[in-house]
Amino acid sequence: MKQIEGGVCAAAGFTAAGVYCGIRKNKTKKDLALIVSEKRAACACVYTQNLVKGAPIAVTKRNVADGYASAIICNSGNANTCNANGVEIAETMCDLLGKALGIPAFDVVVASTGVIGKPLSIEPIAGGIPSLIESLGDDSDGAARAIMTTDVKKKEIAVEFSVGGTTCKIGGIAKGSGMIQPNMATMLGFITTDAAINPAMLQKALSSDVPESFNMVSIDGDTSTNDMVTILANGMAGNEEIAEAGADFDSFCAALGMVTQYLSRAIAGDGEGASKLLICAVSGAAGKGDAKKLAKSVINSPLVKCAMFGADANWGRVLCALGYAGVAVDVSKVGVRFSSAAGEIEVCKNGMGVDFSEELAKAVLSESEITIAVTLGDGDASATAFGCDLTYDYVKINGDYRT
Amino acid sequence: MKQIEGGVCAAAGFTAAGVYCGIRKNKTKKDLALIVSEKRAACACVYTQNLVKGAPIAVTKRNVADGYASAIICNSGNANTCNANGVEIAETMCDLLGKALGIPAFDVVVASTGVIGKPLSIEPIAGGIPSLIESLGDDSDGAARAIMTTDVKKKEIAVEFSVGGTTCKIGGIAKGSGMIQPNMATMLGFITTDAAINPAMLQKALSSDVPESFNMVSIDGDTSTNDMVTILANGMAGNEEIAEAGADFDSFCAALGMVTQYLSRAIAGDGEGASKLLICAVSGAAGKGDAKKLAKSVINSPLVKCAMFGADANWGRVLCALGYAGVAVDVSKVGVRFSSAAGEIEVCKNGMGVDFSEELAKAVLSESEITIAVTLGDGDASATAFGCDLTYDYVKINGDYRT
């Protein structure tokens, strides 16, 4: 298994495109993305757990109920959520794309991201579909950029792996930035693979991966209404179809994990206004669920996030966040260390402060990727959560996002 | 029942003081506060639910276990939490004060607020106690200022009320600002009354009041390690002691509620970096617990808070926060209105956007106190939560608080 160049077009039989169609005012920002599989592909999805759900989620759920899909269309700039005619608009997007590509409308996955509660007009999308299809090619750059909202960096990765001796590829793109604390699914993540795997095993792989990857990301604790991760597997690599648990399924899951872990970290590090990627690694917890709650509590604390922005080794805030996580922790056994490319520093042992060099602490916390390692004395479970610091720019971006 | 001048010294028999003793570097900021009752008083407390608890909490719990106390000592600048000798320091504070005042150490309530995990030296406190006692007077200004950390405004109020024909007084001071999402107790709140009420009924009054007042405040979702609310009732007004439920107890609870509601709103409006007080009033919920969860979810959403800072009527974020609150809500019946001194504007009806004037919305949201009214169609329960906007200054204050 190794990382290779590319994103959603790395796997055989997939093409992608991104264009500006006119949903956004800013004409230099692409706002319509397309991913197409040459062959109808097995498809699995996970969705937001927010009770308020975008119309595209309802339409996609229905379309992929049979376990297959051929294309993904996604617009940015408007979430198509809380609109009276939202479902009709999402259905029309599938209809128009299906006709243009010569595939059934029910083989289209549709997604939207942007402002909630603003009517979405079908005109720019209808007008953009022809040029979108014309632009299809084997570079996922356009699609990766077209799904971005306040993201600063595009997020794509591809991985090569082997299934029973056959070389397969898997790749993905994602967008994140704000309103991000995925719960069951996430922001938008689109993954493609040429491995042959049946829909049930594909769903199983995705559903067991997401709790350890995208669901461990939190930018601001706000679970979006439009989160979705979709994976298409078109089987064009020619391996024997994965239809049950075993070594082949494990290889597939490992490759999928490499893609989702990369995208999760990329989303966290590119959170709205973020200047630093924060990783909280909790070990020694009584159970997996406890470890996750604790890691997320630390990564979500606005006070911890601000301290990391200011490179201030205020570990008391880490203890405070552990203490209110709703998990039974033996405080007298808690240890905390900060580490980064500049080194490692122990700040708390057995629940009490230890002397440390403020100078080294400042150096460690001034790096762009910081790990907060929390050790407990309650058991053997561990979990890692991904987040980012809280900066002036988060406030700036979100103080006037809509208008 | 009416509001009167003053704070913790309004009730008969109470004096207070605040001095600078040397815990803080900044000599112009008082850091040691004292409240004394002439007569030993019935005492009730509620405390933080954070598993990581400040040493003063442990000592206070033990001291007030008998239901009585005579004095409250509180330092700011250091939380005396996660320190190896924290309990010893807190006990010594009680001992020294008790000796100086001629009261038993176990009649002292001790509290600390400030940085976690930094050793607290007894020297400045021991040195400061004589001048603290010398400064005792019937103005609570000094004490109200000495307990402040990053608070900008002092918080005090007093109320006059009648118990069975006898005029009684009740007043309080509080500090809030950051690390604030009280859970069971709150930040620091000290309340005094000259009403006669036995310890059990006093605790009952406080315990039923806090869930509707301090516990409905959230600045940043961080429940502190040192939250505490204490009330002293010295009986010097001369009313017949309240020893059971009934009209007298109800009068007392109403006056207590006036004090705690005022202090809760003052804490929310003076949250770290806050420029606006946010009030989320949820009605039509299926149950009280649901209504509270929903109101707090809205008030805690960083995205809602940023939008309010930017006077942006981004109501989709309110719906999003309702949707992830973990409560079963019929989204198709949700209504949202924003109001302030500048007027009221309906932005969402039956879960969908309604046309509104962006100009009026901007005017409404530019005021310093904004109400977000959420109407549901799920039942008759309601709740109100208090918070504040998220601003550049919150990030600034918390990016470098410790050093």
Image (tube, coloured by chain):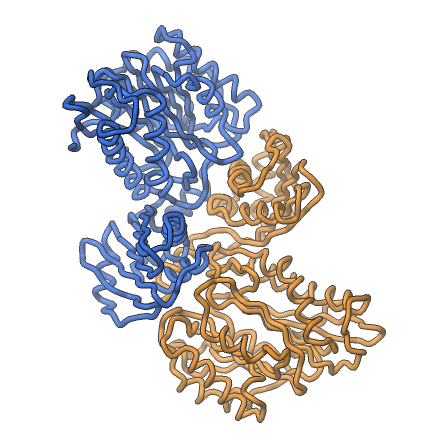
Chain colours: A orange, B blue
Residue in the picture at 65% in, 61% down: A261
Quadrant of the rendering where the N terminus of chain B is positioned = top left
Q: Nearer the viewer, residue A266 or A200?
A: A200
Q: Nearer the viewer, residue A226 or A273?
A: A226
**Residue A25 appearing in the image:** yes
Q: Nearer the viewer, residue B303 or B295?
A: B295
- The part of the image, by quadrant, that contains residue B6 is top left
Q: Nearer the viewer, residue A392 or B76?
A: B76
Q: Is residue B321 left or right of residue A69?
A: left
**x and y, in percent, of residue B380 in the image:** 31, 54
**x and y, in percent, of residue A232 in the image:** 65, 77
Q: Is residue B163 left or right of residue A252?
A: left
Residue in the picture at 36% in, 48% down: B288
Note whether B212 is above or below B369 in the view shown.
above
Please give the count of numbered marks on the rendered protein: 0
Residue in the picture at 31% in, 48% down: B384
**Residue A371 appearing in the image:** no
- The part of the image, by quadrant, that contains residue B189 is top left
**x and y, in percent, of residue B358 in the image:** 25, 68
Residue in the picture at 30% in, 50% down: B278
Q: Is residue B33 left or right of residue B60?
A: left
Note whether B365 is above or below A86 in the view shown.
above
- The part of the image, by quadrant, that contains residue B104 is top left
**x and y, in percent, of residue B160 in the image:** 17, 28
